[in-house]
Image (cartoon, rainbow, N blue to C red):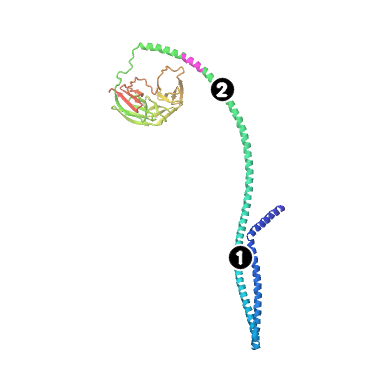
Amino acid sequence: MASGDCKWKQDIYQKLKQRNKREKLQFEGLIQSHTKLFDSSSALKSENVQLNVDTQRLKDENLSLQLKLEGGGGGGSGGGGEKFQALEQKLYKLQEELTEFHRKRGENAQQIIDLNTALQEKEKELQEKDGKLADSAANQNALRSAIKNLEQTILELEATNQMLKDEHTALQLAFTALEEKYKKVQEDNRELVDRWMSQKSKDADKLNDENDYQLRRRQAKLQKELAEAAKENINILPENASIPTKAQYKFDAHDGEVNAVRWSPSGRLFATGGADRKIKIWENIQGKCECKGILLGSNAGIMGLDFDLEESLILGASNDFASRVWSLQDQRLRHTLTGHSGKVMAARFLGDAHKIVSGSHDRTLKIWDLTSRAFRFWDSRSDNSTNEISLQGRITSLDLSPVLVISIHAVIACSWHPVGSYVLSSERQKKVILWSDI
């Protein structure tokens, strides 16, 4: 510790010595000139003192000579006058020299003053440089401390970086192991899927064979029933029913396509459902249709409608994979039936107002029980289906009454009035048409 203290002291001493040498070099000529002037001034002062002494001595001699001249009389006046003149000339010369010395003394004093002023300025500059040097030394010490701190921080960061590298290596190894395990699981899954698909293909072939057999049996049975039914004469239309031939009233029912129309059992009201997700209740008054209410709650277009027998509820099938039941009295949503995996294209009340059947794009029929909130599945591939009819397009509405379709645009849905005097049809041009011969 003592050697360390001596070392920094020696460093400071050497730096001060070098600085003194470097700073002194700039003022070396000035110092020498000042020294020479100071020596010259001292010599001139000595000469001035000597001259003053000589002058005083000459004055004393002159005074004594004058006294002698006054006391000696006229006999020695000739020789004494010459001597007196010589002394006056010498005194005059000495006075001129004294005046010159005084002039040089003033000049030297002015030079000394100027040199002292320059020296003071240089000393100020030297002090400023000493202050700057001290500040630089303090900044240097602070920078050294900061460098030490940064070096310590770098060491800590390097240690942290090494630790993170080790962790990354470990995680990379774990990831590689998991990736290999994942690939193995994928291969096992692919193998299981292949086996499962093979088994499903076998089951499907077996089911197709059974369906073909049942289809042939049903077709044979249907042919036999149709042959027997063809022998009987049945009047389908009611006695007071007639097929209308002209449009009595045409109006805009919805903001988009009208996908479904349905008469109520009494024929007093009818409902329309459109792509604008609304169900509207209408009343036919003297051949004109007035809106009696708008039922909201569906998240997609309405595809099918039905009234219950008591005309207290209305059922709507929607493209959002659900069917909904509204109350006609307060026009509020009562039930939402979800469970299909495709668009619900048709829905009907099954007998009473507590059971509903719905058909969807997912190739299933579901029977819903509103009291117990239970449903049963009916698949077209099972033994419970009665018949299959191939069509060119989608089925968007169902009705058991005879229907007359007369329109210049594609008809989406229609409904026969219970009495048989009216027919409602909807088309893609946002129109609902009321047909009647009355």
Judge depth for marks 1 and 2 and give the one in front.
1
Could you say whether the residue bearing mark 1 is in a helix, strand or loop? Answer: helix
Residue furthest to the front: 78
Tell me where residue 396 appears, x and y as whole percent.
39, 23
Using the image as rendered, state which of residue 34 and residue 150 is in the foreground: 34
Using the image as rendered, state which of residue 237 and residue 103 is in the foreground: 103
Tell me where residue 310 appears, x and y as whole percent.
37, 25
Q: Residue at x 65, y 72 (%)?
A: 45
Where is residue 233, by image quadrant?
top left
Tell me if residue 399 comes above or below residue 25 in the rendering. Answer: above
Q: Which mark is residue 292?
A: none
Q: Is residue 216 left or right of residue 180?
A: left
Q: Name the residue carrying label 1.
A: 115
Which quarter of the figure is the C terminus placed in?
top left
- Quick one: label 1 or label 2, which is nearer the N terminus? 1
Q: Which mark is residue 192?
A: 2
The answer to if 66 sits in the magenta stretch is: no
Could you say whether the residue bearing mark 2 is in a helix, strand or loop? Answer: helix
Judged by its main secondary structure, the magenta piece is helix
Tell me if residue 140 comes above or below residue 276 in the rendering. Answer: below
Where is residue 365, by image quadrant?
top left
Q: Kindly tell me whether residue 268 is visible in this rendering.
A: no
Using the image as rendered, state which of residue 222 and residue 12 is in the foreground: 12
Tell me if residue 438 comes above or below residue 116 in the rendering. Answer: above
Q: Which residues are magenta?
A: 203-212
- Residue type marked 2: Leu
Tell me where residue 74 appears, x and y as whole percent.
64, 88
- Residue type marked 1: Leu
The answer to if 210 sits in the magenta stretch is: yes
